[in-house]
Image (cartoon, helix red, strand yellow):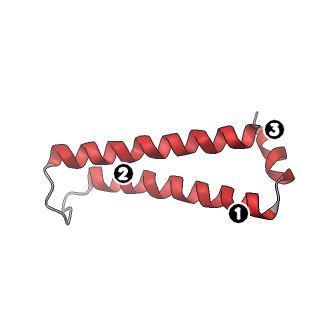
């Protein structure tokens, strides 16, 4: 499966590879932001801890959805 993904990336145009890198970058941004919101003790916004954790989990779930969409787009 990994060889299939690598071969498909090599076949992509420069624009498609740029969009792939951009998609991976935003996946990492959402993931890190979600973790940052959950684990930061001195969060600059006045949000209750339960809502802050829920928002962080929501960002991590969204990041995982983006990740699986990137994988599915590059397998085919």
Q: Quadrant of the C terminus?
A: top right
Instruction: State the CA–CA distance, disc 2 to disc 1.
Output: 24 Å
Q: Name the residue that disc number 1 marks.
A: 18
Q: Residues within 10 Å of mark 2 (few under 14, many from 20)?
A: many
Which tag, 3 or 1, sits closer to the chain's start? 3
Q: Which marked residue is nearer to the observer: mark 2 or mark 1?
A: 1
Q: Residues within 10 Å of mark 3 (few under 14, many from 20)?
A: few
Kindly indicate whether the residue at mark 1 contacts the one at mark 3 (C-beta within 8 angstroms): no
Please say if 8 is above or below 47.
above
Instruction: State the CA–CA distance, disc 3 to disc 2.
Output: 30 Å
Percent from the top left, x then y, of residue 54? Answer: 26, 42
User: Disc count in the image?
Assistant: 3
Quadrant of the rendered image containing residue 37: bottom left
Measuring 84% from the left and 45% from the top, which residue is drawn there?
7
Which tag, 3 or 2, sits closer to the chain's start? 3
Which tag, 2 or 1, sits closer to the chain's start? 1
Quadrant of the rendered image containing residue 50: top left
- Judging depth in this view, the residue of 36 and 18 nearest the camera is 18
Percent from the top left, x then y, of residue 40? Answer: 25, 57
Q: Describe the element under mark 2 as helix, strand or loop.
A: helix
Q: Residues within 10 Å of mark 1 (few under 14, many from 20)?
A: few
> Is 66 placed left or right of 53 in the picture?
right
* Image mark for residue 34: 2
Q: Describe the element under mark 1 as helix, strand or loop.
A: helix
Percent from the top left, x then y, of residue 33? Answer: 38, 57
Measuring 56% from the left and 44% from the top, which residue is drawn there?
67
Q: Which marked residue is nearer to the observer: mark 3 or mark 1?
A: 1
Q: Describe the element under mark 3 as helix, strand or loop.
A: helix
Measuring 73% from the left and 43% from the top, which residue is drawn there?
74
* Image mark for residue 4: 3
Measuring 60% from the left and 41% from the top, which residue is drawn there?
69
């Amino acid at each position: 499966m990994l060889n299939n993904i690598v071969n498909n990336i090599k076949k992509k145009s420069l624009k498609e590879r740029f969009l792939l890198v951009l998609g991976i970058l935003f996946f990492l941004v959402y993931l890190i932001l979600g973790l940052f919101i959950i684990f930061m003790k001195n969060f600059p916004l006045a949000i209750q801890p339960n809502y802050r954790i829920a928002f962080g989990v929501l960002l991590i779930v969204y990041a995982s959805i983006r990740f699986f969409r990137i994988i599915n787009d590059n397998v085919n």
